Image: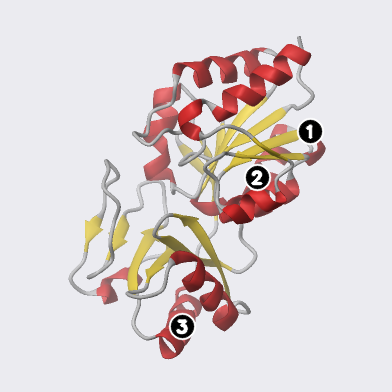
Amino acid sequence: MSLPYRLIATDLDGTLLRADESISERTREALAAATAAGAAHIVVTGRAVPWTRPILDDLGYQGLAVCGQGAQVYHAGEHRLLTSVTLDRQLGGLALAKIEAELGPVFLAASRDGIDGDVLVGPGYQVQEGPLPYVFLKDTAELWAAPLTKLYIQHAELDDDTLATTAKNIVGALVDVVVAGPGVVEILPLGLSKATGLSLAARRLGVKKTETIAFGDMPNDIPMFGWAAHGVAMANAHRDLKAIADEVTTSNEEDGIAVVLERLLGAA
């Protein structure tokens, strides 16, 4: 039995993970069968390594993972970073100042670089409930004290899509701005995306983009779909991702990844 793809790239939140952050047994079995058939599974997530590692450990995952929106290529088996790209803090501060000059104050958080980098949360920034660890700061000046992979911004009045689109129009020549999840608008180094990280990892694995199928649910997955041969959006995906996807599967709560892999394995 063989698959038409040698690499299966999956986002985590809203895609591989259910709402309770678990991975269904059906999806585990489908990924195991695909791996046994000769394909490699690679996680490609906006989460930085510290937020990704517990999921990988639970999966018994030993391969490469693309973390931090493409900023980090992480070897799970060896617990080490292979590549890491940081946001120029001076450029990030300039972009933030330009955004606030146009839109007024934003609430701010940031992800520190490194295998143990903290996610720092400033006053007013609303974090989602769940097990992911944060460090709350009284003064956002502390965010800039060490290298960062990205910034997170929220606005008191603007929704995610409006904030991201408007911010990108203001600072798109300096940084990239993406919607990575509900309430999660990120400022990234210019040109960085899941596609850049995935292409680096695929090169290390000796796999081409024409041999890659990708699964995702949010606009930050659009570059990954553009790079891969086949992009599969979850039923719960953002409308912008569905619009460019090659296929829409069932939701992350209904084993959407397994549905596609089982079909491909059955046809092999």
Frontmost of labels 2 and 1 is 1
Determine the secondary structure under disc 1: helix
* Snapshot quadrant of residue 93: bottom left
Residue drawn at point x = 78 percent, y = 40 percent:
229
User: How much space separates mark 1 and mark 3, taking CA atoms?
Assistant: 40 Å
Quadrant housing the N terminus: top right
174 versus 182 height, above or below: below
Give the left or right position of residue 117, taking residue 192 as reference: left
Q: Earlier in the sequence, mark 2 or mark 1?
A: 2
Report whether residue 83 is seen. no
Percent x, y of residue 133 = 27, 47
Give the left or right position of residue 262, taking residue 64 as reference: right
Mark 3 = which residue?
99
Mark 1 = which residue?
211
Quadrant housing the C terminus: top right
Percent x, y of residue 102 = 46, 89
Residue drawn at point x = 45 percent, y = 63 percent:
185
Mark 2 = which residue?
198
Frontmost of labels 1 and 3 is 3
For label 1, the crowd category at 10 Å Cα-Cα, with few meaning under 14, some 14 to 19 and many 20 or more, is some
For label 3, the crowd category at 10 Å Cα-Cα, with few meaning under 14, some 14 to 19 and many 20 or more, is many
For label 2, the crowd category at 10 Å Cα-Cα, with few meaning under 14, some 14 to 19 and many 20 or more, is many
Percent x, y of residue 123 = 22, 70
Q: Amino acid at mark 3?
A: Ile
